[in-house]
Image (cartoon, grey):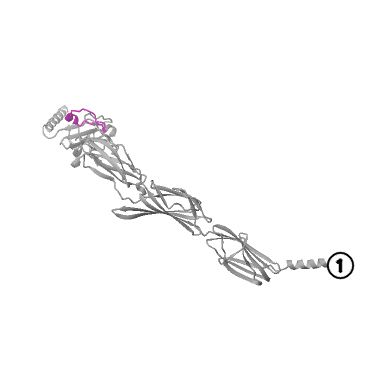
């Protein structure tokens, strides 16, 4: 046989063997994760080690089945048969993406493989605190802490491979009221916080138990419990709205705000040298209440004649106090302040309004009068009762002169039985407003006190800082727009009434003779 023939035979043999390998059947391979079929390249997210199943078959005996975890061979089987089936618990790394590769080889050289990824999140989220204290990710925060301010911000960042679903903070405040131990509880929750969080929590004075619970998307949880002590070392801050130094009213509005770094307990007032005292903000105990870290107050309190030294005191739940002292002089003159704020006359009637306030009075009446004849056209008693210095307002519509001026008269009788009169005269179709009807008043007090002065009416709403002092008495009304104001004082019973009656009769008789 020639060398050429030998070469051809060798090539044929080699070609025949190669064709046999290429044509061999490839083994079949099937994987399951917790009973779920897994295809090559699929990803799973679990919170525990799964049951891992392998099913393999081949036309030729299977030589080996190799399981690799993150590149390292962790299981090797030698079935020595054409069928293989096995289920076992795969031991995966926590908080890691685990690459699982299964390779099957039969005796004919056929190879089949599958690769999947299993992320195991079997632990609760970790947190690194930035406030109200600092701690590293993965480490536990302190179990005890203390602060001097009740309103704290809990903030930090998370570490969890699948992400935090919720963070919840429960506060339990332990306190004693009337020798009875009580617990005030509050709960807050933040959903889908992302990689960090910030939550404001209000703690009560003394001992608080804070429980922080984080839950990830696979329902793994981690809980921290911290015992907090709130120590109040500062007195509350007390700010008072302005008050007048002198007032004609027998009461005044006290208003302001009390704030504290922990919690305001109560606010009280007292007047030096007097039994008058009361509570402006009532204590509700020491239980944590964020609404009581800052409290507004407003209350009208009585005054005694002369100088009143008012002390307003704020106390916090730790017993520390702050006091603001104000001096207000109550001028207890009996002369009331009177005003006809506006009056309009048309179509046989007059509409008018105004007030009587301050001083000390027990009766107030309003009427309309024909100034030509002195005849009373209409009359109404708007107040009669206990002596007061409060605000008696009126808004009336009364009969008027059809084709001539009408006089509107307000009468107030003080507690010394002197009658004080304010009046304005309104022409038909005209209007008297506040600027013309309530400028100045002569009330006769100057004659009693020997003090001739000017008193300005104030038709604004009353408030704590708006009570105004009026110094001196006497003066006259300045009116415009067809209106005149004639203030008069009629003395008490006796000679005063007789003189006024005589003068009035003489004037009326003179008018009739002139006609």
Q: Which residue is mark 1?
A: 5
> Is residue 314 visible in this depiction of the protein?
yes
Residue found 61% across the figure and 70% down from its top: 85
Q: Is residue 241 left or right of residue 97?
A: left
Q: Nearer the viewer, residue 19 or 207?
A: 207
Membership of 509 in magenta stretch: no
- Residue 300 image position (x, y, % from top left): 26, 42
**Quarter location, residue 378:** top left
Reply above or below: 479 against 88: above
Q: Which residues are magenta?
A: 437-456
- What residue lies at 56% left-to-right and 63% top-to-bottom? 91
Q: Quadrant of residue 280?
A: top left
- Residue under the image location 26 percent in, 39 percent down: 310
Return the residue found at the far right: 2
Please tell me how crowded label 1 is: few (under 14), some (14-19), or many (20+) other residues with Cα within 10 Å: few
Q: Which quadrant of the figure contains the C terminus?
A: top left
Q: Is residue 47 above or below residue 424?
A: below
Image coordinates of residue 441 in percent, x first then y, are 23, 31
Q: Is 447 covered by the magenta stretch?
A: yes
- Looking at the image, residue 355 sits to the left or right of residue 74; the answer is left
Secondary structure that dominates the magenta span:
loop
* Up-down relation of residue 66 to residue 425 (above or below): below
Q: Which type of secondary structure does the marked residue at label 1 adopt? A: helix
- Where is residue 79 drawn, in percent x and y? 64, 71
Q: Nearer the viewer, residue 217 or 468?
A: 217
């Amino acid at each position: 046989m020639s060398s050429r023939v030998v070469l051809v035979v060798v090539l044929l043999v080699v070609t025949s063997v190669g064709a046999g390998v290429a044509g061999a059947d490839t083994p079949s391979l099937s994987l399951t994760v917790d009973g779920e079929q897994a295809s090559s390249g699929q990803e799973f997210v679990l919170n525990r080690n799964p049951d891992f199943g392998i099913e393999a078959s081949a036309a030729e005996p299977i030589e080996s089945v190799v399981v690799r975890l993150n590149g390292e061979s962790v299981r090797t089987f030698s079935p020595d048969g054409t069928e293989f089936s096995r289920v076992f618990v795969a031991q995966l790394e926590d908080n890691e993406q685990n690459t699982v590769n299964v390779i099957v080889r039969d005796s004919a050289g056929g190879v089949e493989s599958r690769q999947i990824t299993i992320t195991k999140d079997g632990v609760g989220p970790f947190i690194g605190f930035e406030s109200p204290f600092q701690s590293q990710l993965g480490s536990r925060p302190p179990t005890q802490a203390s602060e001097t301010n009740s309103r704290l911000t809990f903030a930090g960042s998370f570490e969890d491979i699948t992400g935090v679903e919720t963070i919840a903070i429960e506060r339990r405040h332990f306190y004693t009221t009337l020798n009875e131990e009580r617990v005030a509880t509050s709960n807050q929750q933040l959903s889908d916080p992302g990689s960090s969080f910030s939550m404001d929590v209000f703690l009560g004075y003394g001992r608080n138990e804070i429980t922080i619970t984080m839950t990830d998307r696979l329902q793994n949880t981690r809980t921290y419990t911290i015992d907090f002590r709130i120590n109040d070392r500062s007195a509350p801050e007390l700010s008072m709205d302005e008050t007048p130094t002198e007032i004609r009213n027998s009461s005044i509005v006290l208003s302001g705000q009390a704030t504290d770094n922990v919690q305001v307990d109560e606010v009280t007032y007292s007047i030096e040298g007097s039994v008058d005292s009361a509570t402006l903000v009532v204590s509700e105990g020491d239980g944590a209440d964020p609404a009581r870290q800052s409290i507004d107050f407003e209350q009208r309190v009585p005054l005694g004649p002369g100088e009143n030294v008012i002390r307003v005191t704020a106390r916090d739940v730790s017993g520390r106090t702050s006091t603001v002292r104000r001096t207000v002089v109550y001028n207890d003159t009996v002369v009331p302040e009177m005003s006809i704020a506006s009056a309009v006359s048309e179509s046989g009637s007059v509409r008018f309004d105004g007030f009587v306030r301050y001083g000390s009075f027990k009766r107030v009446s309003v009427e309309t009068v024909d100034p030509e004849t002195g005849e009373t056209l209409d009359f109404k008693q708007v107040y009669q009762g206990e002596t007061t210095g409060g605000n008696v307002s009126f808004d009336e519509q009364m009969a008027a002169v059809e084709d001539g001026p009408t006089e509107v008269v307000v009468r107030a009788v003080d507690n010394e039985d002197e009658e004080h009169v304010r009046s304005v005269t309104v022409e038909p179709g005209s209007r008297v407003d506040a600027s013309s009807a309530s400028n100045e008043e002569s009330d006769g007090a100057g004659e009693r006190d020997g003090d001739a002065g000017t008193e300005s009416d104030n038709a604004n709403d009353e408030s704590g800082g708006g009570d105004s002092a009026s110094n001196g008495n006497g003066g006259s009304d300045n009116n415009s727009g067809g209106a005149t104001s004639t203030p008069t004082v009629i003395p008490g019973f006796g000679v005063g009434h007789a003189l006024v009656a005589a003068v009035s009769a003489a004037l009326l008789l003179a008018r009739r003779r002139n006609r």
